[in-house]
C-alpha cells in the first residue's frame, strides 16, 4: 500500500521547477496538484506560463494546472521549493509558518543552525533538529534543505570513507551548464571553453560539506572537523558534475577497502526502500576512463553517484573521481528523496 | 643582424609536425628547408603528403619541399623532432650520433639522466649536461627535450613561486583535445563530455615537474624535493590546457607577494630577447573568471602562461589557476624557444 | 501471446552492432542469443571483446555470450547485419544462401534490383520482391535492407505528402556525429565546427529516396519520378539528423492539409501494432523552434520522426524541417521494425 | 598619404560595438576617438563600462575614452552604429539630421527606399541614392547600412554568378552563435544541438538579397527579380555562417566557368585598394570538405567569403556552399569597408 500525498512546487515554471515537475511525474507516493510561481504567471495554465526547456514534452498531468501565486492559501501541506534565492527566504518562511512542510532546493536556509541540510543516506539524524526549529520559530510547519548540486556529489563520494577518518580534501569540479539554470550560461562563454569560476560555489562546497558530514548531538550541529578546498569550474557538459578528489584519511585503508566501502555503502533510504532511493547509492566503476558525465549520468534514474579511478595520491592519501547528476541527485531528486525520508520518519504529519 | 639557420622537422606531416611548420613560418632566425616523414610520404611534395589540419592554409614556403625519409643524409644540423614515440628513440639517436642537434618534443628522452628537459625561463642551466651527454654517448650531436604539454603549463605557473619554497602541489588539468593529435580524441567520446583519464599523463606531470624545477649540480640532475599529485582530464576545448593548482609553500608570502612574483618573473629568454620569448612569460589576470582557454590562449603568440584567481587554500597554502597553449608553449613553440636559447648559448656549433 | 524468436547480430561488437544489442534488450519477440564478429573477437565473451561506447552499461543478457565468427553455422535463422560495408556483401550473401533471413543495415545490397529497401510505414509492398530474390539467386534465405540514416528521416518526412504529388525536393542535412560510428569523426574536425561533406551521403539520399517512395509493380521496382537534391553536413550534435526540406507538389494543399497529413499518417506497422512501431510515426511540432535534436530525439523510443516549421517556400511550394534518431529509427530500430513486419507477413517462416 | 579621420561608435559597449572597437584598432585611416552608449554607461571610462567579451584584451587606445551619451554633441562627423534595433531608428536619424554620416550595422533603415543597403563589391552604385536621401529628409548628414550577417555571405557567394543570370535560389544556413550577440543564445539551447529557427532571419535574407543584387536606376531601387528561399538554423559554432546554396541560372555555364567567376570576381574596393578590402573577395576552395567555419573563417582578416563544393544540382542548376565571418564581413568589417568606399567616393565630405 502506497501513501498518496498531494504536493506542490514553489517556483514551478523556472528551470529547477521544471526538473521537479519532471521528476515527480509518475511518483508512486506524491501527486503534483499545485504549482506556484510569480504574479506574472499566476492565473495561467501551467503550459501557457511555462517555456518547457527540458528534453521531451511536459508531463501531461501538469499542463492544465492553474498556476497560483506563491502564497500558502490552498497549497498542499507538502511543498517543494524551487524558488529563486532572491525571494526564497520570505516565501519559504511564510509557508512554514502557515503549517507547510517546505522541502527546499534553495540555498537560503541551508546553513541555518536549526535547519537540516539533509542527504538521506548520510545524515538522516539531522532531522532531529526540526522539533527545535518549530519550537524556536513558532512554526507549525518546517523547512528542510538539500545541498548545492556540486556539494552533494562530493559528500556522496566521501561519505563511504567516513569510517576511515576523513581529515582533509582538495577537490576540483567540472560542472555542467544545467547547474546554472536558464538562460544560465551564455553559449558565447562556454562553447569550446572552460569558465574557471562559479559565483559562491567554492564557499558553498566548503561549508556545506562540513555540515553534512557533521553530527547533530546535544541539540546542535557540529561541523565535521575537516579541511575542504574546492576549485570550481564550468565546462561544456549538459548534465553531470565531475569532481576530482584528493583525500587525507586518519586510518590506512587498502585500495580494496576503499572500493568495498564505495560499493557496500547503504543507509536508511535503501533499508526502507524509499521510492527514489538508488539501490546502490555509490557505484565504483572499474573502467579506467569512467565515470563520464554524458555516458553515465542518466543511469539509476540519475540518483546514484559514480566513483572511479581510485589511486594513491602522492600528496594526500588517495585520489579518485566522483560524478553525479546535478539536476536530479543534486536538486529535484534530492529534495524528493528528502521528503520520502521525512514521510517514512512520520514527519509529514 | 639576425642569424640565418637552416632547420628541418622530423615527423613533419603529422599534427605536431604541422604545428612546427606553422610556428616556424616567418621565424627571424630559423629557415625551414627540410622536412622528414615516414617512408610512405618520402619523395612527395609536402603539400601532397600532408592533410593540413590546422586553421587557415599551409605556409607557402613549405608546400613545395620534398619530403625526405627520417635519416640524417642531407638534413640541416638543427632538426626539430615531432616524431611519434614509437620511433623517436631510434630516429633521434641516429641524428644525434650523426652530428645533429635534435630539439625534440617527443617524450622518449625526457627523463634520461643526461638529457635536458628544458624550459628556457626555468632551467637554462640544465644545458650543462650536454657536454657529458656527448662524451658519454660518443655523439657529435646532441638531444634536448621539452616537457609534456600539461607539465609546461604547471611548471611555468609554479616557477615564479620557487623563491617561496614549493613543497607540495595538487593539480587538476582540464586539457584541450588538440593535445591528443590527429585523429586523436573521437568526437563521440568528448562532445559535451569529460574524459577523466589521459594515458600516462599524470605520471609524466609528476616526474617531469620535479626534474624541471630541480637543479643540475655536481654533474647530475637533482629532482626538486616536492610532492606533485595530478588529476588529468580531457575537456571539449580546442586549444589551451587549464590547470587548477593548490600549493604548499615553505615561507609565508602575501597575496600581493605572489602576484608580484607572477608578473615580475623574467629570465634568460627575456634578457636576451630571444625571438619567441614572451616579453612577460607569466601574466596574472585580475578578472575573477579568467584566464579562459578560448579567450586567452592565443595572446602573446601563444607563448605566455596566464595565471589567475589566486586565493587562500583551506588545505594547502594558496590556490590558483594556470593556462597555457598546449600546441605552442606546450610543444612547437617550446622546442623552438629551446633552440633559440641553445643558439644564444653557442651550443648550435 | 508473443512469438519468441532467437536472433543474432552480425558485426555485434562495433558501434552499430552495439546499437542493435541495446535496441534488442527486452524486445518482446526477439531474443538475442548469438553475436558474430571478426576472427579477432571470436571465442571471447561479448563483454571482453567489446568496448561499450553507448550510454550506460551493456545489457546483462549479452555480456556472457561467446562471440562467434560471422559464419552461418549455429546462428539463428534471423540475423541482423551491422557488418562493415567492406565485408557485408560476402557475409550477408553467405548467410542468405545458408537459409538465414538477413535484415541488414549495411548499404551494400540496398540498391539491388531484387532487394527491398524497406521502410515498413512507406513501402511494405516492396517485400513482394523476395520471392523473386530467392528464386533468382537460389537462396533458401533472403536479404532485406533499411535505408541510410539521413534518407529515412527525409522519406518519413515526405511520405505523408505523397498523396499531394511530390515532384521535387531540395534538402540540407545537419547530421549527428553518431552517424559516423566509432571512432568516427575526430573531435579536432567537428568541435565548434561544421564539416560540409559526408562521403557518398548525398548520392545515397538522392537514389535511395526515389526507390523507397517508388512502387513495386509487375515484378520490378519503379523509382518515384521526383528530383532530389541533397546538401549533407556534419554538425556537433550527438544523436539526431535534422533535415531542412523544400518541396514542390503537384497539387495545392493548404498548410492545414499538410499538417493533418503529417499527424494522421498511419500505416501497416501501426495497424498491426508491431512492437517497435511508433503509435504516431510522424509528429508535427507546433513550437516555432522545434524539433531540436538534443531535446526531441529520444521521444517515442527514438522511432518517430518529428516535423515542424511548415511554411510557404518562395521557390518551391512548401518548406519544413524533419528530425529523426539516426542510430535508432535510422539504423538498429529500422532493421528491427523491418523484421517485425516480415514476421507479421509470415516471411520469417 | 593616408587620410586621418576621427570616428565614433554608437552602442560601443555592446557585443557588436566591441567588434567595431576591435576591427578599428590600428586602422590606417580611421581613428576611434569617441564612444557612445546608454545613459547608464555615459561618464565612465570605456574599460569600466564594458565587459570585454571578445578574445584577448581590449585595444589600448580605447580603454581610457570616456563613454558619451548617444547624442551628436561632440561626436566626430563619421560614426558607426552598433545600436540595438529598439533605439537605432531615433539615434541614427538624430545623428544624420545633425550632419553626421551614420554607417550602420543595425537593421532599422536597411529596407528604406532612400537608404543604401551597401556591399561595396556588389552595389557601389547604390550610394547614388544619398543625394535624394538628404534632400528628401532635409538632412545634412546621411545613413548607409550593411546587410544582415547571413545575407552578406549569401550575396557575396551569388554576386560573381550574376552574369549568368540568377533566377532562383534555395539556401540553408548554419549560423554561428556570435551572430546573436551577448548574452545571446543560452548554452542550454545550443550545446550539442541545432536550433532550427532564428527570429526574422529568413525574411531578412529573402528581401535584403533582392535589394542588394538589384539596381539603382532612374532614381530608385529595383529589386533583383529572383526567388529566394531561406532555411535559417543556429549551430554550435563560434564564428562563421555556412550557407548551402542551390541556384537556378538563366545561362548554362560550365563548372569551370563558375569557379573562374568566383575566383576572378573583383570590384571597386579591390581596384581602389581600400584598406579593409580583401584582395580576392571570393575564394573558391578545392578541398572536398572545405570551407569550414572553425578552420577558415579567420583567413584574409575575416573579410573574404569562401565558396566550395560546386556541383550540379538535380533540381536547380548548381549547388555549392559559402562561408563568411559573421561579425567581421557580416557586421563591423562590412560597415568599415562601407565607410572606406564612401570616403573614396568623396561622400564623407
Image (cartoon, coloured by chain):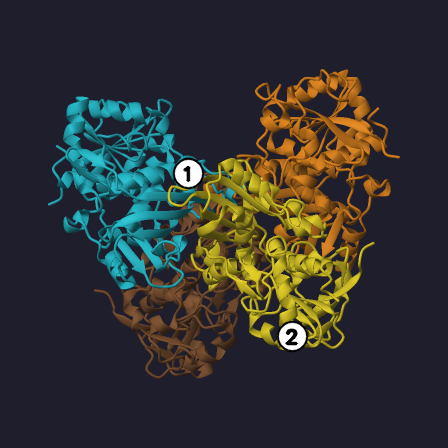
Chain colours: A cyan, B yellow, C brown, D orange
Residue at the image point whose x is 48% and y is 51% from the top? B174
Q: Nearer the viewer, residue B158 or D176?
A: B158
Residue under the image location 47 percent in, 38 percent down: A185
Relative side of A196 to C203, left or right: left
Q: Which corner quadrant of the image does residue D326 belong to?
A: top right
Is B206 situated left or right of B30 in this image? left
Determine which residue is flagged by label 1: A180
Given the image, what chain letter belongs to the residue carrying mark 1?
A: A
**Mark 1 Cα within 10 Å, few/some/many (few <14, many 20+)?**
some
Figure disc tally: 2
Q: Can you tell which mark lies on residue B135?
A: 2
Name the disc covering residue C303, or none: none
Q: Chain of mark 2?
A: B
Q: Specify the quadrant that holds the C terminus of chain C.
A: bottom left
Image quarter where the N terminus of chain C lies is bottom left
D200 relative position to A235: left or right:
right
Residue C146: x and y in percent read: 45, 65
| Residue A53 can be seen in this image | no
Q: At which x and y percent is residue C230?
A: 59, 56
Residue B60 x/y as whole percent: 77, 59
Q: Residue furthest right?
A: D1
The residue lying toward the viewer, choosing from C13 and C123, is C13
Amino acid at each position: 500500500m502506497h501513501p498518496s500525498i498531494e504536493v506542490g512546487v514553489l517556483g514551478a515554471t523556472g528551470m529547477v521547477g521544471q526538473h521537479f515537475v519532471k521528476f515527480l511525474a509518475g511518483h508512486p507516493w506524491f501527486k503534483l496538484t499545485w504549482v506556484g510561481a510569480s504574479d506574472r504567471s499566476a492565473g495561467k495554465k501551467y503550459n501557457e506560463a511555462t517555456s518547457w526547456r527540458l528534453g521531451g514534452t511536459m508531463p501531461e498531468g501538469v499542463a492544465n494546472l492553474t498556476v497560483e501565486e506563491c502564497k500558502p492559501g490552498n497549497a498542499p501541506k507538502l511543498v517543494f521549493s524551487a524558488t529563486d534565492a532572491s525571494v526564497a527566504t520570505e516565501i519559504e518562511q511564510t509557508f512554514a509558518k502557515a503549517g507547510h512542510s517546505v522541502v527546499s532546493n534553495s540555498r537560503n536556509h541551508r546553513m541555518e543552525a536549526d535547519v537540516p541540510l539533509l542527504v538521506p543516506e548520510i545524515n538522516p539524524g539531522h532531522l532531529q533538529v526540526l522539533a527545535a526549529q518549530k519550537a524556536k520559530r513558532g512554526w507549525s510547519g518546517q523547512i528542510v534543505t538539500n545541498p548545492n548540486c556540486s556539494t552533494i556529489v562530493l559528500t556522496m563520494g566521501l561519505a563511504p570513507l567516513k569510517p576511515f577518518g576523513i581529515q582533509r580534501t582538495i577537490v576540483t569540479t567540472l560542472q555542467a551548464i544545467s547547474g546554472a539554470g536558464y538562460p544560465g550560461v551564455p553559449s558565447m562563454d562556454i562553447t569550446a571553453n572552460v569558465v574557471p569560476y562559479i559565483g559562491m560555489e567554492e564557499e558553498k562546497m566548503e561549508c556545506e560539506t562540513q555540515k553534512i558530514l557533521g553530527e547533530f548531538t546535544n541539540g546542535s550541529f557540529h561541523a565535521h572537523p575537516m579541511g575542504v578546498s574546492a576549485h570550481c569550474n564550468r565546462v561544456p557538459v549538459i548534465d553531470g558534475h565531475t569532481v576530482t578528489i584528493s583525500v587525507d584519511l586518519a586510518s590506512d585503508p587498502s585500495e580494496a577497502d576503499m572500493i568495498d566501502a564505495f560499493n557496500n555503502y547503504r543507509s536508511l533510504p535503501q533499508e526502507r526502500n524509499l521510492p527514489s532511493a538508488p539501490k546502490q547509492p555509490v557505484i565504483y566503476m572499474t573502467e579506467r576512463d569512467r565515470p563520464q558525465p554524458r555516458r553515465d549520468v542518466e543511469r539509476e534514474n540519475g540518483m546514484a553517484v559514480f566513483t572511479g579511478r581510485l589511486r594513491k595520491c602522492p600528496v594526500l592519501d588517495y585520489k579518485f573521481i566522483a560524478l553525479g547528476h546535478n539536476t536530479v541527485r543534486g536538486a529535484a531528486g534530492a529534495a524528493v528523496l528528502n521528503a520520502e525520508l521525512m514521510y517514512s520518519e512520520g514527519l509529514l504529519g
